[in-house]
Image: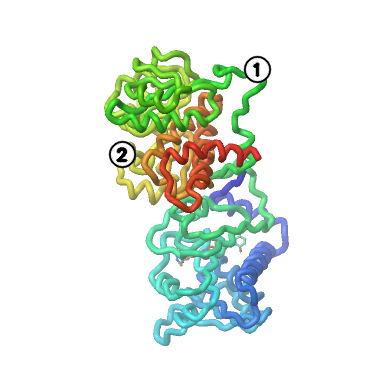
């Protein structure tokens, strides 16, 4: 499991580590690792031009000490100071002693700062780290824009990205690589921040962060492999779980077919479909158990997935919500589901909105959800007292409390019609197989993302291709 920690936790761990170790040790370790990564990116350090953008705090200090190391190896290092009176004194002295050049970044008259950035092969962003608030200030944004061809390395996190949330208010540095210290920060794993971070390298600087204090977690292969349901020797279809699908309509049978396609690959022993698209479902999937009547008369299930293509069929939804088994609600089901009714349920509920649906549920606009995904998913989980899977560029899964899960396998190829229906079926199937709502949602998102990568392989995919590639994703994970 990969964990990310909020700023308050990192600060507490930093204080504890500083009390244990010698003065300046953490910054020395951070700067050494940063310099090593810069050297790796440069290939040949000697003679290469490196420019440091240096702010007023310790983030700038890291950049200055790393710059000193590179200067000692023969790089031409220039520090551009964005707060000349407050730049880290020790770092500045070290850089000067190593032969580095220092330029006043606030002084706009001679263009020296711009030239230093424009002429660099590597730009190190030490403007601001976990102490930052809001986007880049005007002068910093102007200088960052002057870096056209340089490789950009962000120190700890790209300046302008909120470490705790991944929100970007205004301008931020677009890094090729981010070297982060002690722990991943949530803002490096959640969009929009994640998109600014480039490749993230975590450096151990000896911080002791208790796992139970993590703000965010991401499942890795081994975690998913452990959670996948495996049939035992004695299994029959009921022991493996039967998932019920309530989706589609006579006019729009496609959503039903795709949802069933996902459900057939999620580990449940059987899929029951209840609704008006029964003919289309059975024509495509003879192994599905279909009926056209109400869900409550369809036979035993261990979980329901309801909503894709449901239209305004509120009766079916209510019928499902009354069932005392886990229920996944998606798409039209989300629009029709009453908040109090969901809160009153005793069995687990998993809601799977995309950003537009989440925005409608929260009464805000879509852009607001996309720019503050963590806040949105947490708020929905609290309001509905349910597990919420917020789909999108970084899919998040949240319970009313506890760390949020972020899916690491997402791909832009998944932005295709019907892929959400496949995900609903898949997650519903995992619920029926006995996974907790949080695990069912995050394992489904993980497999779905991997399946899309398999199916796409560099070309556009249709939702059906994603469903068909789910077994390959299972094999990947279990192998
Ligand atoms: N944690 C650890 O264990 C270790 C941490 N280490 C390093 O320390 C970093 C944290 O250092 P830090 O606390 O000095 O804060 P930091 O981010 O440098 O800047 C704060 C200053 O910036 C300013 N400012 C605010 N917003 C701004 C904006 N938008 N644009 C421009 N300026 C802005 C604000 O001052 P203001 O101008 O508002 O008065 C504030 O005082 C951390 O990220 C890591 O790199 C390592 O050395 C190893 C051990
Ligand atoms: K930075």
Res 420 seen here: yes
Residue holding disc 2: 360
Residue 286 versus residue 124: which sits nearer the camera?
Answer: 286
Disc number for residue 116:
none
Residue 6, percent from left and from top: 54, 50
Residue holding disc 1: 234
Q: Which corner quadrant holds the N terminus? A: top right
Determine whether, in the image, residue 112 is placed left or right of residue 280: right
Q: Could you tell me which residue is drawn at 55 percent across and 25 percent down?
A: 433
Q: Which corner quadrant holds the C terminus? A: top right
The figure's colour scheme reads rainbow
Residue 239, percent from left and from top: 58, 18
Q: Secondary structure at mark 1?
A: loop
- Quarter assignment of residue 32: bottom right
Report the number of discs: 2
Residue 124 versus residue 250: which sits nearer the camera?
Answer: 250
Q: Could you tell me which residue is drawn at 58 percent across and 49 percent down?
A: 9
Residue 73, percent from left and from top: 68, 79
Determine whether, in the image, residue 317 is placed left or right of residue 112: left
Residue 73 versus residue 198: which sits nearer the camera?
Answer: 198
């Amino acid at each position: 499991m990969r964990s990310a920690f909020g700023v308050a936790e990192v600060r507490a761990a930093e204080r504890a580590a500083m009390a244990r170790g010698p003065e300046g040790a953490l910054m020395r370790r951070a700067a050494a690792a940063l310099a090593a990564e810069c050297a790796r990116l440069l290939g040949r350090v000697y003679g290469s031009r490196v420019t440091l953008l240096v702010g007023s705090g310790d983030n700038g200090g890291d950049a200055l000490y790393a710059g000193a190391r590179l200067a000692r190896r023969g790089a031409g290092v220039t520090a551009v100071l964005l707060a000349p009176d407050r730049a880290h004194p020790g770092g500045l002295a070290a850089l000067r002693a190593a032969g580095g050049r220092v330029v006043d970044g606030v002084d706009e008259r001679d263009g020296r700062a711009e030239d230093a950035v424009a002429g660099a092969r590597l730009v190190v962003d030490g403007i601001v780290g976990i102490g930052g608030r809001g986007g880049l200030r005007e002068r910093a944004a102007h200088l960052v824009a002057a870096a056209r061809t340089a490789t950009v390395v962000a120190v700890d996190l790209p300046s302008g990205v909120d470490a705790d949330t991944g929100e970007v208010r205004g301008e931020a540095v677009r890094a090729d690589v981010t070297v982060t210290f002690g722990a991943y920060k949530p803002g490096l794993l959640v969009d929009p921040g994640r998109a600014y971070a480039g490749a993230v390298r975590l450096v151990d600087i000896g911080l002791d962060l208790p796992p139970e204090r993590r703000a965010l977690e991401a499942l890795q292969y081994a975690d998913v492999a452990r959670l996948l349901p495996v049939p035992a020797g004695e299994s029959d279809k009921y022991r493996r779980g039967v998932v019920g699908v309530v989706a589609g309509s006579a006019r729009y049978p496609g959503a039903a077919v795709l949802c069933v396609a996902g459900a057939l690959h999620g580990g449940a022993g059987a899929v029951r479909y209840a609704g008006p698209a029964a003919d289309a479902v059975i024509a495509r999937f003879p192994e599905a158990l279909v009926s056209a009547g109400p869900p409550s008369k369809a036979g035993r299930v261990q979980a329901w997935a309801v909503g894709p293509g449901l239209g305004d069929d509120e009766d079916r939804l209510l019928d499902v919500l009354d069932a005392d088994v886990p229920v996944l609600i998606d798409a039209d089901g989300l629009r029709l589901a009453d908040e109090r009714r969901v809160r009153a349920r005793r069995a687990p509920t998993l809601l799977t909105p995309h950003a537009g649906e989440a925005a409608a549920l929260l009464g805000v606009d879509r852009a607001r959800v996309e720019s503050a995904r963590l806040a949105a998913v947490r708020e929905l989980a609290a309001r509905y007292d349910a597990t919420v899977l917020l789909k999108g560029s970084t899919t998040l899964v949240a319970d009313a409390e506890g760390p949020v899960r972020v899916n690491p396998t997402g791909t832009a190829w998944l932005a295709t019609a019907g892929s959400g229906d496949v995900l609903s079926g898949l997650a519903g199937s995992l619920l029926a197989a006995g996974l907790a709502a949080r695990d069912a949602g995050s394992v489904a998102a993980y497999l779905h993302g991997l399946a899309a990568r398999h199916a796409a392989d560099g070309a556009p995919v249709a939702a059906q291709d994603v469903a068909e590639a789910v077994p390959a994703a299972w094999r990947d994970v279990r192998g």
